[in-house]
Amino acid sequence: MGRIKTVSDEAVLDGLLDAIEVTGPSGLTFSKASAAVGLASATLVQRFGTRDAMIEAALMHAWDRLDAHTVTADKEFPLNPGGAISLLLRLMPGSAAEYSFTDGLLLLREDLRNPVLRARGRAWGDTLAKALGKRLTSDEDRGEQMGWQMLTMWQGALIWWAFKRDVDPDIEIEAVLYDWYRSVGIGASGSDPIA
């Protein structure tokens, strides 16, 4: 008969994510993970097997949380371009943007290196592009294309904001997304209002 878990998987994964934000994926050892989650290193080895599997599980947990947050945001905002912009702003890290963005690049690097995590990121992008596209146009094919364009613009705007940091990120990103939407010609025609 197996032991009863004293700390839930979710609590362990949350603690591991916090530790990864401090150490970066490459700096997380079983010893540091043990200190972060309050379980013996041997217990973590039993749960995950290897350090790489432990890191992958923690990052998959982060994708689970982002997926859930995306589904909730998709239900909250209207099916118009203003709703698309609001959805993306909701998915931004908020007041922790400066910390989350710079340290998040370490996590992104790990996501790009690991094929399982990379596939998970691609699936999230597909879902988000469709959620945005249905807010930008009623043409499904064009909507998905525009959704990916908007995602690209959003991520690029975040990167350039991180270099400039001269205004609040929400204000900067919102302005960039509105400008992009107007520049593609739909907003200017009056047939597809922004809000």
Image (cartoon, rainbow, N blue to C red):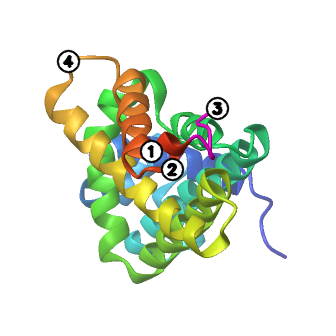
In primary-sequence order, the first of circles 2 and 3 is 2
User: What crowding class fits label 4: few (fewer than 14 Cα within 10 Å), some (14-19), or many (20 or more)?
Assistant: few
Q: Are marks 1 and 2 in contact (CB under 8 Å)?
A: yes
Q: Residue at x 55, y 62 (%)?
A: 129
Of callouts 2 and 4, the N-terminal one: 4
Q: Residues within 10 Å of mark 1 (few under 14, many from 20)?
A: many
Please, what is the three-letter code of the amino acid marked with disc 2? Answer: Ile
Distance Cα–Cα, label 1 vs label 2: 7 Å
Q: Rounded to the nearest whole Å, what is the CA distance between mark 3 and mark 1?
A: 11 Å
Amino acid tagged 3: Ala
Instruction: State whether residue 40 appears in this view.
Output: yes
Label 3, on which residue? Answer: 195
Where's residue 2, x and y in %? 79, 72
Mark 1, residue position: 181
Q: Is residue 30 inside the magenta stretch?
A: no
Asked whether 191 falls inside the magenta stretch, the response is yes
Image quadrant where one finds the N terminus? bottom right
Label 3 sits on a secondary structure element that is loop
Question: Disc 2 vs disc 3: which is toward the camera?
Answer: 2
Q: How far from the left and from the top, in percent, is residue 185?
A: 43, 50
The reply to whether callout 2 and callout 3 are in contact (CB within 8 Å) is no
Q: Amino acid at mark 1?
A: Tyr
Q: Position of residue 89 (x, y in %)?
A: 52, 34
Residue tagged 2: 186
Element assignment for label 2: helix
* Residue 85 relative to residue 191: left or right: left
Which quadrant of the figure has residue 158? top left
Name the foreground residue: 184 vs 133.
184
In the image: residue 172, left or right of residue 37: left
Judged by depth in the image, the label closer to the viewer, 3 or 4, is 3
Q: Is the residue marked by circle 3 packed among few (<14), some (14-19), or many (20+) residues within 10 Å?
A: few
Magenta stretch bounds: 190-195
